[in-house]
Structures are given as C-alpha cells and as structure tokens.
Amino acid sequence: MEELEKENQLYKVRHSLAHVLAQAVQKKFPNVKLGFGPPVEHGFYYDFDFGDEKFTEEDFKDIEKDMRKIIGQKQDFVRADFDEKTVLAEIAKFPKETYKNENITNLIERGETHFSFYQNGPFIDLCRGPHVANTGELPANGFKLSMVAGAYWLGSEKNQMLTRIYAYAFESQEELKQFLDRKALAEQFDHKKLGKELQIFMFSEQVGKGLTMWLPNGAVIRDEIEKYAKEVEFQYGYQRVNTPHITKKELYLTSQHLPAYEESMFPPLRVMGAEGEVEEELYLKPMNCPHHHLIFDHAPKSYRDLPIRLAEYGTCYRYEQSGELSGLIRVRCLTMNDAHIYLRQDQFEEEFKSILQMYKEMYATFKLTEFKFRLSIRDKENREKYKGSPEMWDKAETMLKKALDDLELDYYIGEGEAAFYSPKIDIQFRNLMGREETVSTIQVDFLAAENFNLSYINENNEEERPIVIHRAPLSTHERFISFLLEYYGGAFPTWCSPTQVIIIPVNDDCMEYCQELERDLRAKMVRVKIDTSNASFNKKIRTNTIQKNPNILIIGNKEVEERTVTLRRYGFQEQIVSTKEEFIKDLLEEISTRKMLREPMGSLL
Amino acid sequence: MEELEKENQLYKVRHSLAHVLAQAVQKKFPNVKLGFGPPVEHGFYYDFDFGDEKFTEEDFKDIEKDMRKIIGQKQDFVRADFDEKTVLAEIAKFPKETYKNENITNLIERGETHFSFYQNGPFIDLCRGPHVANTGELPANGFKLSMVAGAYWLGSEKNQMLTRIYAYAFESQEELKQFLDRKALAEQFDHKKLGKELQIFMFSEQVGKGLTMWLPNGAVIRDEIEKYAKEVEFQYGYQRVNTPHITKKELYLTSQHLPAYEESMFPPLRVMGAEGEVEEELYLKPMNCPHHHLIFDHAPKSYRDLPIRLAEYGTCYRYEQSGELSGLIRVRCLTMNDAHIYLRQDQFEEEFKSILQMYKEMYATFKLTEFKFRLSIRDKENREKYKGSPEMWDKAETMLKKALDDLELDYYIGEGEAAFYSPKIDIQFRNLMGREETVSTIQVDFLAAENFNLSYINENNEEERPIVIHRAPLSTHERFISFLLEYYGGAFPTWCSPTQVIIIPVNDDCMEYCQELERDLRAKMVRVKIDTSNASFNKKIRTNTIQKNPNILIIGNKEVEERTVTLRRYGFQEQIVSTKEEFIKDLLEEISTRKMLREPMGSLL
C-alpha cells in the first residue's frame, strides 16, 4: 500500500515536472507548440514542435535553471473542468496549439465528455492530472534533463516529427543520485560490454542472429555452472539423460506444442523423398519435455520407482523475432538445466520442499539474495490459449498456491504468465536497472501424462497417471550468465572464473619458480597462466586487474628465495604472503567449496 | 607376405569345400541344379535349385557327414581348360545345369575366351580355381554348415529364387572353434543387445531414425568420458568452446562444405519472410570446424599465441541413409570430442608428437591396446572431389608421412580415405568380429586458413597463415560407446560404470547401516544404490551380476556388528572383507585414478 502511494506521489512529481519543463521551454522558445508530456519509468518527457528553431542538449543548462526558478516561485497547480462543448471555447483561446486542438477534436470524436486543464503560473495544459498542489513541493535537484530525440506526433511516421526532451526525475536529490550511480554502473557492467571486454561470447553474421558462440572464457563459466548443478542435483537424486536437438513433427503433435507453440519455433526441416514428396518433417526442439516423457515411458514403472527425476542440460531453439534479440538476454539458441520429475500425488509436498531447498542452496552459492515468488496462472480473459481441462488447471493452480501458503512464502500473482500447458511458480530477480527477470521456475503439469499416456503401477496393481513437475533452477545459460556478468560486474569468484590464477614474474630470474608454480597448479586442474607479455610490471598488474582475474601472484626474488608467493586478490586491498604450499592448499579449498570471498559488486548498490 | 599366403591357402580351402558341399548335396538330391559357390568372409556358400524338393537345416548333419567322407576319399582336384568354342561342347554334357549353361552363354557374350572346369571325384564344376590339390588336404572338422537362405539367381528378383547354403570354414578345427567362440561372444556382447539390457540408449519412432536418446545409464557413461577427456585435454593446453547446432548457409559456402559435403547433410531449414521469400537458410552442422575457425579469427593473434587449441564436445547432424543406420554405429546425431589446433609450421612436429602422446594416454585408460595407423590420402583416380590445390595436398600428405616415419610408427596407406579438405592419419581398431573401425583421427589442413582467411602476425610483423590440425581421439560418443560396450562386454570399470556400488542388505536389521553407507558414498559422489527389491538374496546377487555392476556390497549382521563390508567385484572370484573406511578409501582411489582392475572381456579372445 505504501509502495502504491509512493508511486502515486512520484507520478505526480514527474507529471508536474513535465509541466514545469514545458513552461521553461515556452519561455525560451515563445513559438513552440506543445505535444504530449507524460511521466515514464525513471522520469518523464515532453514533445515539442520547435518550428524553424532547434533545441539541443546545449539548452539543457538554461532550461534546468529556469525550471528551478519556477519551482522556487511556488506556483499553485489549478484545475479547471470542461465538457465537450465548453472545452472548445477554452481551447480556441490557444490557436497556436494545433496539436492540442487536434487531440481534443479526436477525443470528442471518440465520445469523450470530460476535460480538465491544469494551470501553474502562466502555463496551461490540457491534462488529466493528478499533480502536486504547488511547484514548491517539487525537488529542485531531483531531476535532470537527459536526452533529446525525435518522435512522430501520435507515433505515426505519416505525421510531423516532434522534438522529445527526456528527463530523469525522482523525489529527492539523493534518489536521483542513487539512480544515476546505478545507471552508470549498469552501463559499466552491461553484459554485452563485459562480454566483449572479457571475451565471454561472440556472434557472427555467418552463423546467424541470436546464435551465441561461446569463447573459451565463456565456455569455462558454462562448464563450471554445469558441473556445479550436476553435483548438487546428484545429491538430490536426479539422473541425467541426453536427447537430440531435432525431432519429428509427430512428437510435437503428441505434446500439443504444435500448433500451440508453433510461433515460437523454427520452421521445420523437410526431408524430401525420391518422388519429391515430403518424407519427414523435423523440428528443432524448443523444449526438452517431450523427449523426457518418452524416456520415462520406455520401461514400465512401479509406484516404488517414483519419484523419477530426469535432468538434462538441453540446448533448445526458439525463433525470437530479430528485433527482440539482445545480447544474451534474448537469443535463438538456449541451453537450460531442465529436469522433469515424475511423481505420485502423495509425494508432491515433499518434492516441492526439496526443490525449493535445492534452489536456495544454489542461490547461496551464487550469493543471490533478493528474489520474489510469482504464482503464474492462466489469463482469465483468454482461457482458450491453455491446453487441458479447466479442472486440471484449477487443481494444479490450487496445489501450487497451497504449497506456497504452507511454506509461508511471500508471493504475488502473475495472471497470464502460465505456460500453455501448466501454471508455475517463477522466482523473480531484479537486474541492476531494476528490471525483473525469471531465473527459476517450477511447473505442475497434469497434461503431459494425458498427452503421452504416462503411467505407473500403483499399490493396488492399477495404472495411474504420475504428476509431472518441470523445473529449472538456473534459467538458461544465456540469461543466467548475462545476469551473473552484470551482478558480479564481470568479477567471478575463483571457482568459476575463466582464469583462476595469474602469475606475474618480476624479472626473468623468477621464471623457473613461476613455471614450477604453474605446473603444480595445473596438475591440480587450476586454470593458471604466467603473464609473459612484454608489458611493464605495473602495466601487467593493471591489465590483469581490468580483466578481473581473481588471484594475481607476484613473484620476485624474495618469493623465489623463500619459496613463497605474494597474492593480490581482486577487490581486496591487502596483499597476502604465504608459502607456496599454504597458498595452493587455501586456493584448492576455496575452489572445491565454491567460496565467494567478496560480495557481488551488483549487490553493493 | 605370410598373411597373404595364409589367406590364399584359406581361400583354396573354402573354395574346395564349396565343391565338396555341392558334391554331397548332389548325391542326396540327384535332381538339384547348381548355381554359384564362392568363398566368403568366415567360410563359403553354394546356391542350389532344389526344384520341388526342399532343403532344410535338418539336412545339415547328413551332408556334413558325407562331406567328411569325401574328404576321407582324398579326391584329386583336376583342372581342364577350354576356349569359348570347346566349352560349349563340354557344358552340353550337362543339359540339366541350366544355370551353368546360362552363365557360360553370358560370359561368351561378354567376350570371355578362357574357361576352366575342376573335377574332384564325380563332381565337375565350371570354376576359375584355385583349389587344393586333393580333398585329403581339407580339414574334416574345420567347417560347419551354418544357415539356409533364399537368394535370387544373379541377385535379381526377376530371376528364380535359389537355396543358399552357408558354411563357416577354417583351416583347422581349432580355428573354427576360436571363430565360433568369438562369434558367440560377439552376439552376446552386441552393443544393441547390451544397450537394451543395460538400459544405455533407446530410439523412438516419434523422434526419428538414427536420433539416439541416451537413458540415464548411457548418460553417465557419456558424462564420465567427457569429464575424463576434458581433464586430459586441460593438461595438454586445450581450451573449450561451445557453438550452436545450426548455422547460416553462408558459413558452409565459405568452408566449401556446400556443395562438396551436401549429400551427407540434412536439408536446410528455411525461414520465410513476410512476402513468402526465403529470408535465411540454416543448416544443421555436420562438423564443428567452421565455427571454431570463426572463433580463432574473432581477435588478432600473434605468433606467440600459437598453438591455440579449441576443443568442443560438439553434436553434429549427418543425414545417413536410413538403410545404413545401425544401433549406435551409424546414427544421424553424433557427438564428438573435436578440436582444432592452429599452429605455426615450425610447431607441427612437436604438436603431432604431443597429440599422439595424449592419444596413447587415453587408450591406456580404456585398456585399448591393439590398433593400427592408416595414412589416409587422396584417391588418385578421383582427384576432383578434393578441395584445395594439388600442392597443398602434396605438402600435407608429405608432412603426415614424415611424422609417421620419424616416429617409426608402423602404418599402411588408405588411398581415397582422406577427408574432402585434407589427408589424415586414422587410428584403426578392430571390433570383436574383426571389423576395422576408425577410433581416432589427425588431419592436417592447409585449406581452412585459405577459405577463412585465417592469419597470425609472425615475428617479422607480417600476416601468415596458420596450419590447422583437426583431431578427435575418442571417435564420436555413439561409436566409441558402442565399441566399449562390446569390448567390455557391458562390464565397465568402476569409474565410468552407471552404477558404481550396489548394497544388498541380508535382512531388514541391516538396513540402517546400509543407509549410512549409501549416504557416505553419495556424499563422495559415488553412484550407489541399495537393492530394496523383494527378491531373494540369491536372486539379488544374480540380477546385479547380470547387470554387470562392478561392486556388490553384501551387508549382513556380522558386517553391521563389525562395521565392515563384504565386497564382490564383477569378474573376480574372491570376496573382500574390509572396514567401511578402508573400502571407501580404496573405492575413491580406484575411481579417481580411473583404474580398470580386470582385462576387458573382449581382449581375452
């Protein structure tokens, strides 16, 4: 509730500041014509037609100064209301404002009968409000003009191109500063930027859009995450399987992906027969579920075999629109740590708890602390897009809700966020800019057992349908690694860092000992490199720090003599001197327990 | 040379035995007409037209007995030669032999002018020979009639169906026995049979032909092999990458896979544009090379960066004809531990040695001891199917030959066995039935650097082309695991066995201790199961032995009391009693060093 009020107040502040901006612009450019000026995420904008004049970012300073003056003048916002007849008389007073006039005409045509104007000082605008009572309430240092851009009137390229002035706006200078700091960091930590600097991944025009090529550094991160997830899942009783990336159309008819999910799938690959007929149609798999169901079904199961947990790091293909592709966030080739659990009704509660327990264990390893549960259910208005009977859906939604309630977890409802075959619980994280992302999911599916005729033999020797849980704790590699890149600011903990130890020899005499160190570490499977570049010592330190290498060993004559190492760890001030053996022992301990010594840089905001 | 003579002698024996068979058949079935009777692998066959009579396997005993009698009679083989005229007079003496007559007529039409007949005892046959001098030389117990099958005259289904009698034949009873033993074992160890019994893999009509679905047990073996290969390759300086399974047509035009390799590729997947035009064509990758070349090329390289070794467990798709698909031996989806090494000319020799060294290390782990090197070069008669200049090919072939010579390795030449883009060294293993399979390969490629315009900056600051080595030590997962399944007879060493330890409680009182054992082992990542089935103790031992579980722990009251375990290892007679701690310590040691305690069952032949 407080959140909502806060947002309302923020909405009023931003909306009012838009009017203040327009007033300041009108003062400097008396011939300007007004467009729209709404609040938006992080601030507001206002559209103007400057006619023959030109507004540039060089005008920002003057306008901001004048806006502060208007705030200092403590102008009251005064509302006046009109109906569809009286409004015409009112607007006739402003013949220059052709856009406002056109807007009112359009609104009347569409049957609008209530209109309000807000005036503060000399500035009047057609506007629904609400606003603050007085410009004196506005934060004189809580806003900042940010950008000038072109924008077509009413969003149509057939219309006049207007000038849009963007601003960030918050309720206080402090909040604005926080936002700007966060934004600067988000830009610095942008996964596309870091992905390039740290050589994590690449795309190639010759390979295709949205088809990620993982460079050696990225492949290390993928492999380490996979190894970790496999270890944890082993402890939780999962078995791994491996299935192909293409499959006959028939399977997706059985699963009802066709036609329900066809839009998101790549077109089929048609094998032609000798007579030019289509011999078979194969699809790239968009999900791993159907294959796992076939594997469950390949041999008879007894109630004593359940739960059966089939897991796969499966690579799937989805045809995202090319305009929506963005770095690793939206791609066309995605690898996810998918699993499907086949269980009896009476096993659901325990299994659900066990899944959540495992998720929490995984989050702790990655130092992921802030998340929200979302219960994603059907869209009430559009029920026909969901497969399976309403009774199934009611049952599945109720089970998930009950599980959340029983565990006393805080959650919110995401209407229309269900998969086409089942409701789910999504676990939502915020990225650096506050955008919500689904990192983990748990789905309860009654449909799969029907579609694939899955069954087990129960205690009374009868066939019974298992429940199917779909779950993915660590999103796709693509999303999860892009998230981690930003959350860690590119500085990965030693265990999953592409290079784990960099050795810098102070001079050539130290090389032999450095090579000994390298050999010993590599034999223990440590990813180690000697920096043999021609750069100066200081340059080497700098370069390896920019590369966010977690451990830099500095080896000079003293270290050689005493058979020690001097360790600089990323993000720590102090250097640690220890014997070679101690260092190796501590390092292996840090790696094998997957310790993260620092807080993630993204969590410090 | 000795090998060849041996084969010639074996050829004569088999050929002569075919005549002896025909003589025996003629005696029992005087109206029979003769077809052809050649030696084949493992023996010989003879085709007969029995007219209204019927020959079945029940006749084998009589015929074999009569064959031995003929051998005992020491009949001489006597040759008579004819030209195209005299042969007609000769064959006219046998009007009943319509097939022989037809054959001679055909041969004369095709211009044949030399004909020979061989007679032994009462039996005469048109035949090129050679034969042994006398039936007394034939091994009376070195052959065995094996099968009766139908076969069309001259292989055409428009012709008469004849009865084909197959026989195995060797030079001695001992050799026959050896063969039959090997054959029985090969049938028992057939990977398709074992794959099913041990639940390693499955196929599904709904997924598609040749598209393997790896069941949990198979996925364990894959994962263990991958983990092992990754560890070894890490020590040899390889970096891993990860690339998508589909790629735009353009890439395969650059690499010249299109059109050179198109026949082996799946048809493209066509993304259609809004106007019904083909927006892009994407192919499933048949090889990983082009993607790796792009990754090499994504950032400039210096001579000091080389060699760069990019490795990937890449899954590729090849459209094998459906008639050629067979278990895991020929599939359409194949995952191989591929790597591409980019290096300078002067690094070739050392790198080649290093690769061989690594291969030998890997073979030792899997106890693969018998292999041959094949230098696979161009087909002299069909040079246009190879891409790149003849000079490149000469150079590459010479380099590989020199490397083999320098290392004094025994090898043979495989003409026409080169890849379309480079010659290669194949390392050939024999399966249980003696069929040769390529397990490993090393290719030297000058073409890739040209096609992809790959370069590095040499010591003189000039651009230079790297050599590219393609190498794959462990075939594809599909072929390698099918090979191992047969070679190991399904009994994998503990480190890569699907289940590593089975615990059998003698009674319910032992269960708590069994669970403690299970917990302790699982915490150490050991794949352990308690056999909680309702079966009797003996049945449990039997079932788990049939399942080839490497370690069975028997836990009775004595073990609980003394906190010991009684261990039965697959393939060993004696049981080992040790304390729980000793057992776990030894087991972890066996696993981490990837020991194979027994000789592979296939190596015992």
Image (cartoon, coloured by chain):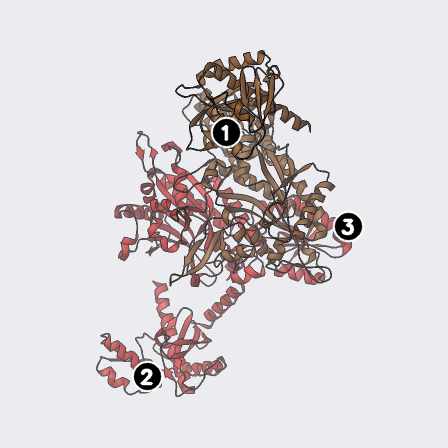
Chain colours: A red, B brown
- Amino acid identity at mark 1: Asn
2 or 3: tag closer to the N-terminus: 2
Tag 2 subunit = A
- Amino acid identity at mark 2: Thr
Q: Is residue A358 left or right of residue A521?
A: left
Where the N terminus of chain B falls, by quadrant?
Answer: top right
Q: Residue at x 48, y 48 (%)?
A: A362
Q: Position of residue A196 (x, y in %)?
A: 56, 61
- Amino acid identity at mark 3: Glu
Q: Position of residue B142 (x, y in %)?
A: 57, 18
- Residue at disc 3, secondary structure: helix
**What is the CA distance from the residue labelled 3 to the residue labelled 1?**
91 Å
> How many neighbours does mark 2 have within 10 angstroms: few (below 14), some (14-19), or many (20 or more)?
some
Name the residue tied to disc 2: A98
- Asked if the residue at tag 1 contacts the one at tag 2, i.e. Cβ–Cβ closer than 8 Å, the answer is no
Name the residue tied to disc 1: B103
- Residue at disc 2, secondary structure: helix
Name the residue tied to disc 3: A561
Q: Which label sits in the foreground, 3 or 1? A: 1
Q: Is residue B76 above or below residue A128?
A: above
Return the residue nearer the eye: B199 or B602: B602
**What is the CA distance from the residue labelled 2 to the residue labelled 3?**
84 Å
Return the residue nearer the eye: A439 or A350: A439
Q: Position of residue B32 (x, y in %)?
A: 45, 19
**What is the CA distance from the residue labelled 2 to the residue labelled 1?**
102 Å
